[in-house]
Amino acid sequence: MTKITALEQIESFLNEKGNQKYHFNNIEELHYKIPSGSLNLDIALGGGLTSGAHRFTGINEGGKTSCALAFAKNFQDLFKDNGMVIVVKSEGRLSPLMLERSGIDTSPERFFVLDCNIFEKVFELIRDLVYNNDEKKRYMFIIDSVDALCRINDIDKAFDEPEQVAGGALITSVFLKKMVLPISKMGHCMILTSQVRVEVATNPYTARGGPKTKQAGGNAVKHYANFILEFEERYNSDIMFTNPSASKLEDKGDPVGHYCKVRFRKSVNEKTGAQVRYPIKYGRTEGKSVWREKEVADLMFSFQMASKKGAWISLSEDLKKELKENNIDHEEKFQGEQKFLAYLESNEELTAFLYSEFKKFSDAI
C-alpha cells in the first residue's frame, strides 16, 4: 500500500471541488505597505498599513478622518488606476475642503462615497465588491464611523423605542468574522473609525487611577484589527504659533499648525503603547497637510544632523559632507527655527533628499 504524505493529503483536500470555495490558499497574497505621509508615523508602523482591517479611534477633531484620507491618497498612488477608495459617510461629514486638503483623486473610477448609515447594507456592498471583482481592483474601505451605523431593524423604530443592546457590535463581529480573511488575502485594506467613550464608575468613590476610556463599537474590531491607533486630545503645548518664543499664550500670535498625537493600542510590530507625534500645517492642500519640513527638521535634531546653539542652528559636518557629495546646494547656519523651516520649504531639493534618507530608515524596518 502506497503511503500518502501529509503534504499530499493537504493538497488533495484543498483541490477537492467541494472545498475550493471555502479556503483562500489558491490566492497569492499581496504584500504592500501604504505610507501615511508622516515619517514618524510610518517608522512606527514599520513602513505603513498593510492589507486587512485597521481601527482608528479617539476624540472628535483628533485627526482620524484626515489621517485615513492621507492613507487613501497614498493607496491610490501605489495602485494607480487599479486602486479605488470607498468611503462610507455614515456620520454625514466629509467636506469638499477636507477632500481638497487630502489631495485624493475623486474621479468616479477611483473614489466613491456611500451615503448610508445601515450596517447590513454597508457590509453587503463591501462583500459584493470583494467577491465579485471582475476588474481585479484593489479597494480601500473607510467606514467613518462605525458608531454612526444603525441596524436595519432599528431604523424605523420610534425614538422612544429601545434598540437591541449591542446589536451593532454583533453585526460588526459577524461581518469581520466572515470578511476579514478575504479582505486581507485579496489585497484590500479597511479602516474603521470609532469614538472613545469614558467609562462611568457605578461607585464614584472607588479609586480608579484616572479616567478609563473604551472604544465604541464592541470588542470584535479589537481582535480582527492589525493596528488600532488612538488619536489623542490636543493641548496648547501641541499647537505651533507664529511667535512660539513668547511667554504668554496671548502673545504667541495665530496658530500655524499642531502636533497630531497617536497612541498605538494594538500593533503587529511590538509598538503597542507607544505614542507618535507628527506636525500638521494649516492652510495646505493636495495632500501636503503633514508638515514635512517641520518633521524633517525635528528628525535632524534627533539624529544630530543639526544642532542648536543659542539662536543659531548649524548643520553637522557629516551632513554637509554628504550634501556636497550629492551636489546639493545648502547653507550651513540659520538664525532661529523659523528661518530654518522657511529655508527647508524654499529648498525643495534639500528637503526631498533629507526626506528620502529618513524614509530609507522607515522602509528598512
Image (cartoon, rainbow, N blue to C red):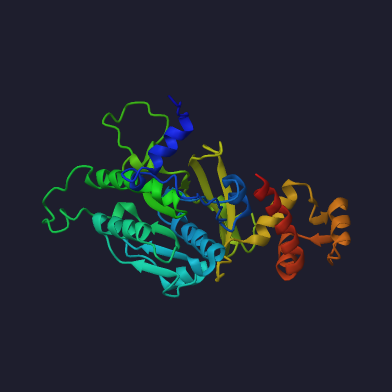
363 to the left or right of 162: right
In the rendered image, the vertical position of residue 20 relative to residue 335, given as above or below: above
Q: Residue furthest toward the top? A: 1
How far across and how far down the image is residue 162, in percent? 13, 48
Quick one: 141 or 310, which is closer to the camera? 141
Place of residue 218 in the rendered image (x, y in percent of width and height, measured from the top left)? 31, 42
Query: Going 28% across and 44% down the picture, which residue do you hit?
Result: 174
Give the vertical position of 357 relative to 215 (above or below).
Answer: below
Task: Quadrant for the N terminus, please.
Answer: top left
Q: In this view, does 355 lie above or below 103?
A: above
Q: Determine whether, in the image, residue 102 is placed left or right of residue 203.
A: right
- Residue at point 38%, 44% (across, down): 23
Question: Residue 343 appears in which quarter of the rendering?
Answer: bottom right
Residue 84 visible in the current orientation? yes
List x then y, in percent, for residue 94. Answer: 39, 67
Residue 341 is drawn in which quadrant? bottom right
Q: Determine if residue 217 is in view.
A: no
- Name the quarter where the C terminus is drawn: top right
